[in-house]
Image (tube, rainbow, N blue to C red):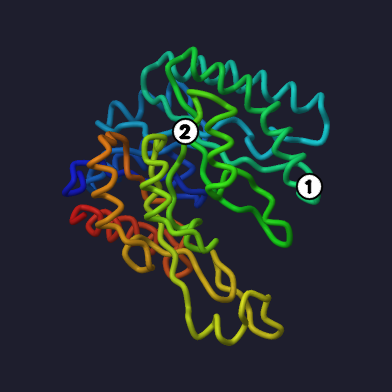
Amino acid sequence: MTTRSGFPIGFRRGWSDWQKNDLKTLAAWAKQSGFDAVDLTRATADDIKTLASAGLRLGSVDLIDFGNLMHNDAGKRKELIAQNVAYVKEIAATGATKNFFTVVIPGDPAKKRSENYDLMLEAYGPIAEACKNAGASLAVEGWPGGAPYFASLVCTPETVRSFLKDIGPAAGLNYDPSHLIRLGVDHVRFLKEFVPHVKHVHAKDTDVDADALYEFGTQPATFAKPHGFGEWTWRYTIPGQGVARWSEITSILKNSGYTGVVSVELEDEHFNGSEAGEKAALVHSLNYLKGM
């Protein structure tokens, strides 16, 4: 099924057993439930055939081991970059998807951000060139990284603008409002500025707790435990249960001519952890997005 704006709705394949063990069974459930697409972390030719046989679209695939593309060991970086260049050529040649998902994660989060930015250009330059030659794009998600450094790049307008300029025409974005909300970046203003570069969309939301913000501010709490898939003052949720303005988001995407997938990324402490809970969350998200 599609959103009211006409976008196919999919979901990102998760790490729980019922999702990761048997793609054929997962694809059959996705199709029966009304989804149009599935995103894969790593795709093989057989995986692509499995989705196609089920009548599903491949929304995106991850770059190989992208968390180590900026590894401190130059030899490991070179080897992994070469693997990804070959992988981009292989997957793009199938025509199944042109979107290669990644997060820009420095190998040394304690380094100055400007130094890690230079290393990002070195690591991603050859992969972006392979994408350009294959008619494909990177789809960078702005996950900020873990505490205490929150060192990931291409998360906020500052580095997104530089990334788009310096990496070139194959530089694209995975738009995920949940990360912008937790960072305090206006997620609708961000989309208005960068929508021409959006190649893929994650339907994930963030709930912000005003009482917790009063209680803890932006410091870690002294006694309270953080949320699962969140911290003390915010948590990731399924779409529609946070503060993301989905009707505005889909309107901006439609008016820009976006034709890609809107894909649920399930990270919600109220649903993750059981097959029944995760299936319920995915179907609830599908039904919510159909109205957007």
Q: Secondary structure at mark 2?
A: loop
Residue visible at 63% across and 79% down in the picture: 225
| Residue designated by label 2 | 172
Q: Is residue 272 above or below residue 22?
A: below
Q: Secondary structure at mark 1?
A: loop
Residue visible at 54% across and 83% down in the picture: 212
Locate residue 64 relative to residue 71 in the image: left or right. left
Q: Is residue 256 above or below residue 208?
A: above
- Nearest the viewer among 280 and 1 is 1
The image quarter containing residue 67 is: top right
The image quarter containing residue 40 is: top left
| Residue designated by label 1 | 112
The percent position of residue 4, horizontal first and vertical second, equals 16, 49
The percent position of residue 99, horizontal first and vertical second, equals 43, 29
Disc 2: CA contacts within 10 A as few (<14), some (14-19) or many (>=20): many
The percent position of residue 232, horizontal first and vertical second, equals 58, 76
Q: Amino acid at mark 2?
A: Gly
- Label ID, residue 261: none
Q: In what quadrant of the picture does the C terminus appear? A: bottom left
Q: CA distance from mark 2 to mark 1?
A: 24 Å
